[in-house]
Image (cartoon, rainbow, N blue to C red):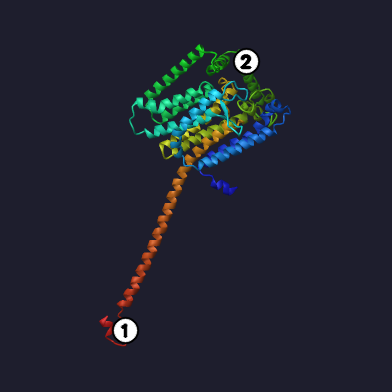
Amino acid sequence: MKELVNKLKGDRVIWSFVALLALFSFMPVFSASSNLAYIGHGTGNTLGYLVKHLAHICIGFLIIYWVHKVPYHYFRAISKVALPVVWILLAYTLLKGTVIAGANASRWIQIPFIGITFQTSTLASMVLFIFVARYLSKTRDEDEPFQTSLIQLWMPVFITLMLILPANFSTTALIFSMVLMLTFIGKYPLKYIGIILGSGVVMFLFFLLLAKAFPESRFFSRVGTWASRIENFTTNKPDEDDYQIEKAKIAIASGKLGGLGPGKSVQKNFLPQSSSDFIYAIIVEEYGLIGGLTILGLYLLLMFRFVIASHKANTLFGKLVVVGLGFPMIFQAMINMAVAVELLPVTGQTLPLISSGGSSIWMTCFALGIIISVTKKDEEIEEELKEKEKREEALKKLIDKQLAEENELVNEEEVEGYSIEDNAKNPMEAVMK
């Protein structure tokens, strides 16, 4: 075990927080999966869901381990090639995507021969953030005109967002916000950011007008859901989402300060998506306000560590990659918690590293692997400098030793060649020499 830990490079604090969140997830998932167990096979046995979640977490940590060994600057070139591939996957998802978990949107595709469903928007967001970081780091010292950045930066961004928007508005809004934040940190001109923000709002309004004009189209089927969720959030009109929020609020109120105890949740049997979208409500019900604040604190500490890792990164690309991949993870967690306590409308965002689900856990772990790879680069540079100093010191000692031996040999030769001591039979030999 000690040898395995020694093989883990990068920021050990990030490793620790990720491990804590993953370990904490087992009990809530085991408890909250009872609803799925009753619906799935009618027995209520959640052991299978626990084993499945364990497999997802183990694979996720293997992904972190493999990815963190890859130098992060390799992803700089990969992002440019991967973006068109992502567009193809997103278009395929819109046309032939799978509907799972009771959702009325095609957000998943099924991998052939394996049978694993995969949410393409999670991969698209990660590739897009790396692509934006690449562009900003490349053009930092160049005074490129706005028209050039429109083609090279914003056109790929808007193509990606338009392919995600019809099926998932919350993810689109989160990605767009994070891209704007990245450009701000990357010192992209503020007036251009304002123009892009205004253009994004105009394009979204145009999308809504198209939805009104073609309400029967499958590409605009989610618009009615968005409108009803916002309306229900601002009014007391009851519907399915209101039912979920009410059950989540009952669960949170039942938890009080110390909670009902692990596995003793009552609302898990009535709350849909209790093991994914609303798992935070189950956590507060079973572990109380203390447990809920602990989880919130872990995410905030993880964000703080991302800030430190970004500050320590030795390149602008590394700084932007840490922010671009780390902050969306934290904001997604905040959105999930805010939905559970009715601070935001229902969005369908999971709680990273805690909610059940394969592709969401794996993509989160992939992003964490890249972040840790950025922090590992600094360690490698320090180790290389230390090794270089040791080599130079050893070489200096070797040279000094060699010089000392040569000086000693020369002194011996001089004494032997020019000694005035008379060891010969001829008394004039010493003088002759």
Q: Position of residue 361 (x, y in %)?
A: 57, 33
Q: Is mark 1 on a helix, strand or loop?
A: loop
What residue appears at the point 40 percent right and 61 percent down from the top-left corner?
398
Q: Is residue 156 visible?
A: yes
In the picture, measured across the screen, residue 307 lies left or right of residue 344, that is left
Task: Give, as a three-letter code, the residue at label 2.
Answer: Asp
Reading the image, the residue beneath label 2 is: 239
Image position of 408 with respect to 351: above or below? below
What residue appears at the point 57 percent right and 49 percent down from the top-left corner?
3
Q: Position of residue 385 (x, y in %)?
A: 42, 49
Image position of 432 with respect to 150: above or below? below
Q: Badge 2 local density, few (<14 within 10 Å), some, or many (20+)?
A: few
Q: In the depicted view, which residue is nearer to us: 179 or 336? A: 179
Reading the image, the residue beneath label 1 is: 422
Q: In the depicted view, which residue is nearer to us: 247 or 356? A: 356
What residue appears at the point 64 percent right and 26 percent down from the top-left corner?
274
Comparing labels 2 and 1, the label whose residue is closer to the camera: 2
Q: What element carries label 2?
A: loop
Mark 2–mark 1 distance (CA, rounded to whole Å): 120 Å
